[in-house]
Image (tube, helix red, strand yellow):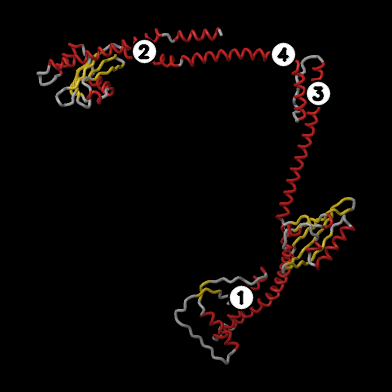
Amino acid sequence: LASNKLVGTGVDYWFTSQTENAFQAALDIGHSFYTAAAARLQERSISLLKENSKTPGLSPKILAEACSDYGLHLAGIVDEKGLPEMLHAGSSPDSLWQEIRPQIDWKHAKEEGFYSLLWSNDRGDYAVGLLPLNDGTGRFLITAESIGQGVMSKLRRISRGFEEYARLKDMKKPLKVSIQLILAVLSLLVLFGSIWYGFRLSKEFTDPLLALADGTDRIARGELNFRLQDEGSDELAQLVRSFNLMAEELSDSRESLTRANTLLSRLNITMDERRLYIETVLDNITTGVITLGPEDKLQTINKAACAMFHTSLAILYGRTPAVFLPSDYVPIYNDMKESLRLHPERHWQRQLDFIMAGRIWKLVVTAVALGTAGQVQSTIVVIEDVTDLEKMQRMAAWREVARRIAHEIKNPLTPIKLSAQRLARKFGSIENPVFTQCTDLIVSQTERLQEMVQEFSSFAKLPEVNLKPGHIEPLFDELLTMFRGSHPRINWETRFEEGIPPVLMDAGAL
């Protein structure tokens, strides 16, 4: 209560009427100072116009004398837009007027008989007045008088201080309430602090038991690294030490289990990687692989085996080969199963022709039994497609036969060619075109046969056709020569059109 009374008295003292009156008096003094300066400027402006009313106008000389006589800092004539016609000042009239001009309200200056304002810069404070000239041009007589330096800034500080004081005075009652609330809060804090201290003393006796209970709950939730402080040497401290020992043993056990689980996880990852590797290999090899589980039910089949059987794993999974194999191959499957049952340590192998979808496959089937103690638990069947291999072996054998046949054909060609050449040399002096044509034909055809036999012997195939531009007239002549010799009773004649163009052909193959 005493603090509340003291606060109320102090706040009331801050906002006494003497303080407000002092601010108001200072503002009145400044206003009176400004009013007096404006009245002087108005009086001097009117006097200046009256004294020179008989002259045609104000000259720079008159303005200079007015500044000297009336103690003016600036005098001049400006038009209705504020543009100077003539100015006179102590120094730099144009720059001084350019600083004053933006501060003037020209609308009010035209409406009022005399317009004044206060203006300041870093060189001093000035009272500025504008008096309209009654000559119908809208011009103004401007005058400015120095009123010292720093006056306006001081008046502004006094005005701001008074406004701040008025605002604080409006907040007098809320301020008193705020301070009273602060005092009330401090009182409550002291009260609650006393209560808290009492509870703190009581908790010193119960905290160890509560900590032990909390530690038990945290251990139960899995926080095995939690430990209690075991300060002291009484029975309660001994209980805390026993609790910490129990938590440490549990933590060691969990770390051992964690290491074991980590090792198992790594082994599982390794096994998964190995399984993925094996599956990738099986899916990309050309050999078919099938896995049969207990009761000979199909468990896995790779892409190559699916292509051989024209099926998929989704269709065959869980079915026995005796169900989906063609009936002709079921006895072979039963023979494999019986052989592996009697001799599980041996592998079963058979080569057979497998017909599926109109195609004959040459297959080599190998089966291996997996199990323990002589019991077959699963079977792996490997199916190798040797169709292309057998075809290549046959082609190799036929090539060898072809080379031998070509060799036997080639042997008599050489004597025939040599005999024809010997006849041509021996009887070349005889002027008989038929004889010459026959011997040349025998030599050329023998050489052609030798080339064909050579290529047949080297590659076991006919020579390739080599097309190039050529004329067909010599070919017809050579052909007719052969027929003239075999059919002498027929009169053979050839007629060719002129200008037959060359054609693409292989003259040796025709």
Report x, y in % for residue 335. Answer: 86, 63
Q: Which mark is residue 448?
A: 1
Report x, y in % for residue 149. Answer: 30, 12
The amino acid sitting under disc 1 is: Arg
Circle nearer the N terminus (3, 4): 4
Q: Which mark is residue 201?
A: 4
Q: Secondary structure at mark 1?
A: helix
In the image, 360 versus 40, the foreground residue is 40
Lateral position of residue 99 relative to residue 460, left or right: left
Circle nearer the N terminus (3, 1): 3
Which residue corresponds to mark 3? 245
Q: Secondary structure at mark 4?
A: helix
Q: Compute the Cα span from label 1 to label 4.
A: 126 Å
Q: Compute the Cα span from label 2 to label 4.
A: 59 Å
Q: Secondary structure at mark 2?
A: helix
Q: Name the image quarter holding the N terminus.
A: top right
The amino acid sitting under disc 3 is: Leu
Which residue corresponds to mark 2? 158
- Residue drawn at 79 percent across, 32 percent down: 256
Circle nearer the N terminus (1, 4): 4
Lateral position of residue 363 relative to residue 431, left or right: right
In the image, 264 versus 253, the foreground residue is 253
The amino acid sitting under disc 4 is: Leu
- Residue drawn at 80 percent across, 28 percent down: 250
In the displayed structure, 212 sits above or below 465; it is: above
Neighbour class for label 2 at 10 Å: few (<14), some, many (≥20)? some
Circles 3 and 4, Cβ within 8 Å, touching? The answer is: no
- Residue drawn at 77 percent across, 66 percent down: 354
- Which of pointers 2 and 1 indicates the residue nearer the eye? 2
The amino acid sitting under disc 2 is: Ile
Lateral position of residue 472 relative to residue 93, left or right: right
